Amino acid sequence: MVNVIFSGFGEGMNKRVFARQGDLVLRVAQDNGVKIPTDCKDGMCGSCAIKIEELDSRPNSHSFDSKVDPDAWDKDKYTTYMDDKELNTLVEMGAISKKEAESAQQYAQQTPVRLACQCVIKGPILVTPFES
Ligand code: FES
């Protein structure tokens, strides 16, 4: 089980929950009463865009602290590979640049903006709404 913190989704929805590795962020949110907008649930509409940050998982760290270092992002540890559909949707909605998408494809990198309906949890993360 890993810590997932949802923050900024509205009153009563700032929550720290436990998720299983392999769970979808969207499913964990819905199971815990966190409302993330959805339309297609298939990586096509972009309505479920979220920001993902790696959580500092040290035992005594403050639960809402996170360390954000995109250059040091360990994609294998926190979330999963992004497929072309998700990357294309994020580019079309202007959440990431085409260059960032190409880099993510080429190096199998994680981008800080994801689609909740496509993002599989592997490690402790902070999830906040994406605001364009
Ligand atoms: S709900 Fe449409 S992309 Fe996630």
Image (cartoon, helix red, strand yellow):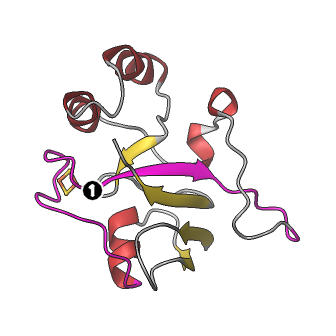
Residue occupying image coordinates x 19% and y 63%: 38
At which x and y percent is residue 87? Answer: 29, 32
At which x and y percent is residue 53? Answer: 58, 49
Which quarter of the frame holds ligand 1?
bottom left
**In this picture, is 59 found above or below 78?**
below
Q: Is residue 109 left or right of residue 129?
A: right
Residue occupying image coordinates x 73% and y 70%: 63
Identify which residue, 8 or 57, lies in the foreground: 8
Residue 119 appears in the figure:
yes
Q: Which residues are magenta?
A: 32-60
- Which quadrant of the structure image shows residue 101? top left
Q: Is residue 9 magenta?
A: no
Residue 24 appears in the figure:
no
- Quadrant where the C terminus lies? top left
Q: Is residue 59 left or right of residue 10?
A: right
Identify which residue, 83 or 63, lies in the foreground: 63
At mark 1, the secondary structure is loop
Residue occupying image coordinates x 84% and y 62%: 58
Q: Is mark 1 within 8 Å of ligand 1?
A: yes
Total marks placed: 1
At which x and y percent is residue 29? Answer: 39, 74
- Which quadrant of the structure image shows residue 106? top left
Residue occupying image coordinates x 11% and y 57%: 40
At which x and y percent is residue 1? Answer: 61, 74
Q: What amino acid is labelled 1 in the image?
A: Cys
**In this picture, is 67 found above or below 11?**
above
Mark 1 crowdedness (10 Å alpha carbons): few <14, some 14-19, many ≥20:
many
Q: Residue furthest right?
A: 60
Quickly name the residue at label 1: 48
Q: Is residue 52 magenta?
A: yes
